[in-house]
Amino acid sequence: MDFDQMLETWRAQNTAPPYDVNRDALRQALHTEEAKVLRALRIRRWVRWYLWIVGTGMAVWAAFWIAITITNGWPAIYAITAGVSVGLFALGVGALWASRGREPEPNFGNTLEEEVRRSLAFVDYQLSDTRRWMMFMLGAASIAVTTMLFSWTVNRSQDIPDSSRSGWFIVLLVVWIVWVFYSVRKQMRKAKPKLELRKRRLRELLASLDARE
């Protein structure tokens, strides 16, 4: 029995004989659901830090490339594109930083009531996650696209011939980014009614637990 089925069973007891639900099973369902949310948050945190380090490093490299371009007297277009790269890398890093949000605090007790409150906090966090996801995707997309722009700047300034496939790769990258944006937004819209229902049932569950104490 999964988390939502367990909540449905508890809720059904409002019209069923007043027997007690298996609290150990309910606690296990709460732990399982919480572990899923924490695992997703942990993966996103690792990816965010990786992209943040890469974006910061690339921004510094692009800034140095401006100085190198001016010192060597290369065409101004390379200094301009390197400057644009610095700005876009900074935008990506800033968007990733803004996507952190404030994760639910683990400072809850060990009683079943406190664990339900913790689950409510995680559901509230998931419901408010749309803006953070969009900022995360904006940051990741900005760093990915700007990496291509800066690579072009470095290659052209060094007379390194571009691969004939690079143009197609950029097009595919842009298409992939748009598809990911659309997919994430669609999934979040689909998940919102389920999360709102779960929140309502968790509140009912908490009220029932408080009433039985």
Image (cartoon, rainbow, N blue to C red):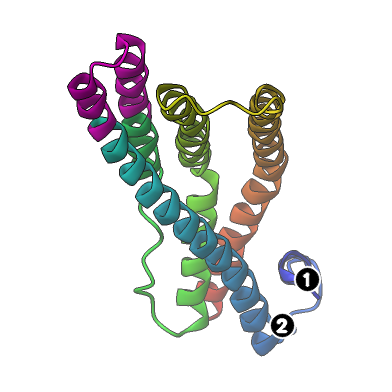
Percent position (x, y) of residue 48?
44, 51
Secondary-structure class at tag 1: helix
Percent position (x, y) of residue 208?
59, 70
- Say the numbered circle drawn on residue 21: 2
Q: Is 154 placed left or right of 162 in the picture?
A: left
- Whether residue 58 appears in this view of the structure is yes
Q: Residue at x 65, y 83 (%)?
A: 28
| Magenta span of residues | 64-88
Q: Residue at x 70, y 41 (%)?
A: 187
Vertical arrangement, residue 2 with respect to residue 163, above or below: below
Find the distance from the CA under tag 2 to the CA under tag 1: 8 Å
Q: Which residue is mark 1?
A: 9
Vertical arrangement, residue 173 with respect to residue 70, above or below: below
Q: Is 186 placed left or right of 94 in the picture?
A: right
Q: Three-letter amino acid code at disc 2?
A: Val
Q: Quadrant of residue 10?
A: bottom right
Vertical arrangement, residue 95 with respect to residue 88, above or below: below
Q: Three-letter amino acid code at disc 1?
A: Thr
Q: Residue at x 30, y 10 (%)?
A: 76
Q: Quadrant of residue 204?
A: bottom right
Marked residue nearer the N-terminal end (2 or 1)? 1
